[in-house]
């Protein structure tokens, strides 16, 4: 077993709320500077930028977990991870059917798709803010693609699964906590310690991408090994 550092909740400029500097090359360069081993680009409700990251990774000593952050009908966030870009894109075909026509404070100009040179090549024409996909339906779709489910930032009051469900009543693989305030939150909710817990940046800016602070022990530096860890298969 070897120890690997991770940040598997990062948003690119495809996410409407991400900073304009969150381009593929900028993110990968920052992740390398911070000496991470695993990253995941988990844009809001879309995987459309993953292909470019995959192409660029040939020049980096990083492993990319294909992922996406979904805001489900119940209005909380779920991180979904897959073993390949192809499987993630299959899931994206499902998500597109459930996007809501509600731009809120954003527009398609806030949802940028780039090429390998960080140049804008397109914008996403449907709002990526929310979906009407119920959580239990999301679980079925992810499991059909052998994907992994992590309940995002459950200690964030306004977008936590804990506002909608008891954890014992639903299917998932792991929990994610925001690093700030997590110790107090866990001390007040000790029952959560029975579950696998991740700490990610949920970064929307370059500087907030995690340092080498959170790590896991894996057999090898591969997507499958990381996902097997989340599935409880060491």
Image (spheres, grey):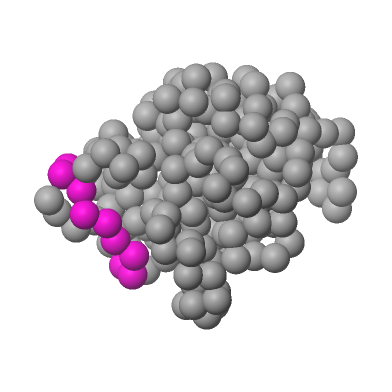
Q: Position of residue 130 (x, y in %)?
A: 76, 41
Looking at the rendering, which quadrant does residue 219 occupy?
top left
Q: Residue at x 72, y 56 (%)?
A: 163
Q: Is residue 116 magenta?
A: no
Q: How many marks?
A: 0
Measured as percent of width and height from the top left, residue 192 is found at 48, 62
Is residue 52 visible in the rendered image? The answer is no
- Relative depth, front residue between 220 and 169: 169
Residue 61 shown left or right of residue 156 in the figure: left
Residue displayed at 58% across by 41% down: 170
User: Is residue 115 rendered to the left or right of residue 137?
Assistant: left
Tell me if residue 65 can be seen. Answer: yes
Residue at the far left in the pictured view: 1
Vertical arrangement, residue 44 with respect to residue 200, above or below = above
Above or below for 150 versus 46: below
Give the percent coordinates (x, y) of residue 71. Answer: 69, 43
- Relative to 35, is 21 on the left or the right? right
Q: Residue at x 39, y 33 (%)?
A: 54
Quarter containing the C terminus: top left
Instruction: In this rendered view, identify the residue nearer to me: 169 or 79.
Output: 169
Q: Is residue 219 magenta?
A: yes
Instruction: Tell me if residue 224 comes above or below residue 234 in the rendering.
Output: above
Residue 177: x %, y % from top left: 51, 63
Residue at the spot x=47%, y=21% of the render? 145
| Depth check, front residue: 160 or 21 | 160
Q: Which residues are magenta?
A: 212-220
């Amino acid at each position: 077993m070897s120890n690997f550092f991770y940040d598997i909740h990062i948003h690119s400029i495809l996410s409407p709320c991400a900073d304009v500097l969150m381009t593929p090359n900028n993110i990968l360069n920052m992740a390398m500077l911070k000496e991470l081993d695993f990253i995941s680009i988990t844009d809001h409700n879309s995987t459309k930028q993953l292909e470019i990251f995959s192409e660029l990774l040939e020049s980096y000593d990083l492993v990319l977990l294909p992922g996406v952050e979904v805001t489900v009908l119940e209005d909380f966030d779920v991180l979904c991870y897959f073993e390949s870009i192809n499987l993630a894109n299959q899931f994206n075909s499902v998500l597109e059917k459930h996007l809501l026509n509600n731009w809120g404070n954003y527009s398609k100009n806030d949802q940028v798709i780039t090429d390998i040179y960080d140049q804008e090549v397109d914008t996403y024409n449907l709002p990526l803010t929310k979906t009407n996909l119920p959580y239990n339906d999301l679980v079925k779709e992810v499991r059909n693609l052998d994907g992994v489910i992590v309940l995002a930032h459950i200690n964030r009051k306004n977008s936590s699964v804990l506002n909608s469900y008891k954890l014992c009543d639903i299917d998932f693989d792991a929990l994610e906590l925001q690093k700030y305030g997590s110790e107090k939150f866990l001390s007040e909710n000790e029952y959560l310690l029975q579950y696998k817990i991740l700490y990610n940046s949920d970064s929307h800016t370059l500087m907030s991408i995690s340092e080498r602070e959170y790590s896991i022990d894996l057999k090898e530096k591969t997507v499958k090994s990381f996902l097997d860890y989340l599935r409880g298969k060491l």
